[in-house]
Image (cartoon, grey):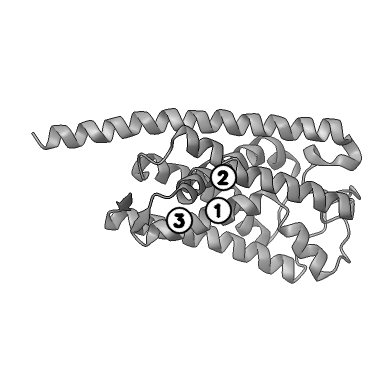
Amino acid sequence: METTLSPAARRWFAVNAILAWLGLAVSLTLTLANLYPSTVTVPSRYGADPTAGLGSRLADWFSYFTIWSNVVVAVVASVLAWGRARATTVLTAARLDSVLLITITGLVYAVVLAPISAQRGWENLSNSLLHQITPILTVALWLVVGPRGWVTGRTVLTALVIPLAWVSWMLLHGAAVGAYPYPFVDVVVLGYPRALGNIAGILVLGLALAAGFWGLERALARRVARSRRDGSI
């Protein structure tokens, strides 16, 4: 099934994509240039070694959940900005992931990370785009323009692939370098039982959010269908 979006919706998705790509570009540039301020004091946390080489910094950068969630948003929003999108299994799952993962990014940052983090200079821009502006805009667009009818039980299950892929990559990379992106997944400090328990808790939160988005999607789809039916009478 092919979905045709209105010109206004396409423009908003283009804005969504541009802001997500911009946040990623600024963050990647700071990583490549090794310009992120070194404020990490825990040896088992990314950024603790200011002398780390380019390859190490890039691998660390790509291991952040924030980066994965913003990449998914940027790619999906770019596809939707073209205006015509075929509702394939991959695209519908990626669309749900774009909303789901960026919501988790915004929530975890606001509740867990913001109170213990500090940014300077250009890091303020990338941080605001990645953790605040893009999450808010992405969820708002999903609520207002959809596309509707793309979330089903099968979509929820398929959408688990990307989060589980991130968990696997993050843990494998962490085991190889002895460092982790966030305090609540730091295996060196917490040990595997507590770290995996925290990850499981976030996955449960993700499933709860996905179920909530599914229910809300059905309600919004019924509202759209009713509006179209009433308008045609």
Q: Which amino acid type is marked by label 1?
A: Val
Secondary element at tag 3:
helix
Residue 170 location (% of width, % of height): 76, 49
Residue labelled with disc 2: 102
Residue 185 location (% of width, % of height): 79, 40
Residue labelled with disc 3: 77
Secondary element at tag 1:
helix
Residue 220 location (% of width, % of height): 34, 33
Residue 202 location (% of width, % of height): 67, 33
Instruction: Please tell me which of labels 3 and 1 falls first in the chain.
Output: 1
Secondary element at tag 2:
helix
Instruction: Please tell me which of labels 3 and 2 falls first in the chain.
Output: 3
On screen, residue 51 above or below 151: below
C-alpha separation, residue under disc 2 versus residue under disc 1: 9 Å
Residue labelled with disc 1: 72
Q: Residue at x 73, y 35 (%)?
A: 199
Q: Residue at x 64, y 54 (%)?
A: 67
On screen, residue 212 above or below 7: above
Q: Residue at x 41, y 43 (%)?
A: 142
Closer to the camera in the image, 140 or 3? 3
Q: Residue at x 60, y 48 (%)?
A: 131
Q: Quadrant of residue 214?
A: top left
Closer to the camera in the image, 68 or 24? 68
Q: Which amino acid type is marked by label 2?
A: Ile
Report if the CB atoms under discs 2 and 1 are less than 8 Å apart: yes
